[in-house]
Image: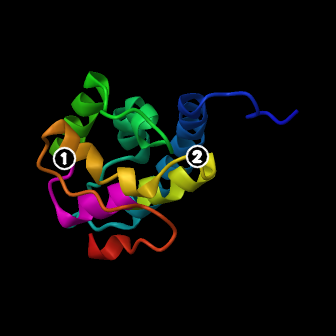
Amino acid sequence: MSFLQGRSFASHLIILLAVAVLSKQHHLASAAAAATTDQRISVPVCSKILEELTPCAAFVKKGGTSAPSTACCSGVNDLKNIAKTNSDRQAICRCLKQVLPEVGNSYDPSRIPLLPKKCGVPLNLPPLDSKTDCAKV
């Protein structure tokens, strides 16, 4: 029996959140250390992004709920406040692009852009799959 077998989609995201925290914090710390004092890197941390969107798991999975939960919409709104620059939006895209496939094919990439629309939040999220070019977000 594998470690993730029998766990819910949300549980998978929470487990991946812990893994993402470690890998992204290391990556961002390395990038920040390389920045000059005049050009500090200030991009959203992947763990924060995942924290905001974990309540959306029931909506983005294949055959998911017809509408995102209130907690999900609150997270999407918080994400909008984090996504102030192109660099921020690209960091969000890269984070989700890296983490979502790790949950397997139980999520529907086409439902990602529906999150802000269904929540009434002015934020553009592309369908996220292996072909998504986050540099164009």
Q: Is residue 64 left or right of residue 134?
A: right
Q: Nearer the viewer, residue 94 or 66?
A: 66
Q: Is 91 rendered above or below residue 36?
A: above
The quarter of the image holding the N terminus is top right
Q: Is residue 102 left or right of residue 122?
A: right
- The mark nearer the N terminus, 2 or 1, is 2
Amino acid type, label 2: Ser
- Does the segment drawn in magenta span residue 84? yes
Mark 1 crowd level (few <14, some 14–19, many ≥20, 10 Å Cα): some
Q: Which residue is mark 2?
A: 106
Span colored in magenta: 83-93
Return the x and y of residue 10 as percentages of the image width and height.
Answer: 53, 30
In the rendered image, which quarter is residue 125 located in? bottom left
The quarter of the image holding the C terminus is bottom left
Return the x and y of residue 99 as percentages of the image width and height.
Answer: 53, 51
Amino acid type, label 1: Lys
- Does the segment drawn in magenta span residue 61? no
What's the distance in space between the residues labelled 2 and 1, CA to CA?
21 Å
Please give the label number shown on residue 1.
none
Q: Which residue is mark 1?
A: 117
- Furthest toward the top, the residue is 70
Q: Is 62 rendered above or below residue 94?
A: above
* Magenta highlight: main SS: helix
Mark 2 crowd level (few <14, some 14–19, many ≥20, 10 Å Cα): some
Return the x and y of residue 60 as percentages of the image width and height.
Answer: 42, 43
Task: Let me know if residue 41 appears in the view.
Answer: no
SS class of the residue under badge 1? helix
- Residue at x-position 39% and y-position 57%: 110
- Residue at x-position 19% and y-position 37%: 119
Total labels: the figure holds 2
- Residue at x-position 24% and y-position 32%: 73
